Image: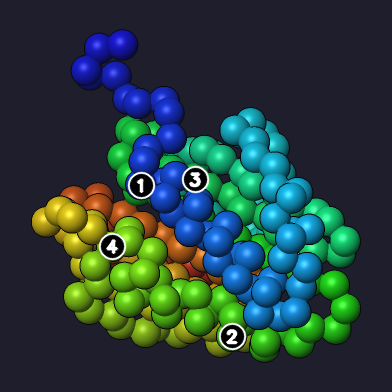
Amino acid sequence: MSNGEPKTGMSTGIKILIAFLICSGLCVVACCGGGFYFFRQAVNMTANPAEIQEMQKLIASIEIPAEYKPKSGVTSKVMGFNMNIVVYSRASGADDALIMMQMKLPGNVPEDQMEMSFENQLDAQQQGQSQDINVTETEPRSFMIDGEEVEFQFKTGTRSGTDQQVRQVTGVFPSRNGTTMLMFLEDEEHWDEEQVVKMIESISTQ
């Protein structure tokens, strides 16, 4: 492959984000009283674009920027626990990525408890525990999703261990089959705030 061709494999940064989100999912299960061991044993991954797009449709409708393509999907279904993670990344092979993680727990776990558990994991990530970015500034913004106000965190920082400027957007919202955490990560050179806002405003679970 020549140096001018885009990379086709998953970048290290995206792998780290997926690993972080899977760990976050396991922590949410544990915090909500779930079966940690059994949940961990049933994680499956796919790189099939059609399968990833179908998984995304089960989570929510969203207008994803055209330069982002399906990269990976993760599912886990066991004993009433359901988890879906879809990853879209920039076709050029950069570490820019859109990740949506949906979880549904068995029983009557309140939706607000699920959201709080997700948000606790996001707080841990913001404090540097996930080792993906060093956050220097955070701005909360509210958006309407299907008539409900949802807060997203717009963050500025650098990739861990480098001086590469990066933007990150995170938020938690009720979705079609559970509660979903969205994470969007993009290098400063690619950042298009208007496009990101349009993407968030397009989210619908109806």
Spatial separation of the CA atoms under disc 1 and disc 3: 13 Å
Callout 4: SS: strand
Quarter holding residue 83: bottom right
Judge left or right: residue 96 versus residue 41. Answer: left
Tag 2: Cα neighbours inside 10 Å, few (<14), some, or many (≥20)?
Answer: few
Q: Quadrant of the N terminus?
A: top left
Amino acid under label 3?
Tyr
Q: CA distance from mark 2 to mark 3?
A: 25 Å
Q: Nearer the viewer, residue 1 or 18?
A: 18
Mark 2 and mark 4: span between their CA atoms?
22 Å
Dot 4 amino acid type: Ile
Query: Which residue is label 1 attached to?
Result: 13
* x, y percent for residue 122: 46, 75
Q: What residue occupies the far top of the structure in this picture?
A: 1
| Label 2 vs 1, first from the N-terminus | 1
- Residue drawn at 39 percent across, 83 percent down: 141
Q: Quadrant of residue 101?
A: bottom right
Residue 161: x and y in percent read 18, 55
Dot 3 alpha-carbon crowd within 10 angstroms: few under 14, some 14 to 19, many 20 or more: many
Identify residue for label 3. 88
Q: Is residue 6 left or right of residue 8?
A: left
What is the basis of the colouring in this image?
rainbow
Sequence-wise first label, 1 or 4: 1
Residue corresponding to mark 4: 133
Q: Residue at x 59, y 33 (%)?
A: 47
| Label 1: which secondary element | helix
Is 152 drawn above or below residue 22 in the view shown? Answer: below
Image location (x, y in percent) of residue 38: 78, 58
- Quadrant of the image occupied by residue 146: bottom right
Amino acid marked by disc 2: Met
How many neighbours does mark 4 have within 10 angstroms: few (below 14), some (14-19), or many (20 or more)? many
Residue pointed to by mark 2 = 116
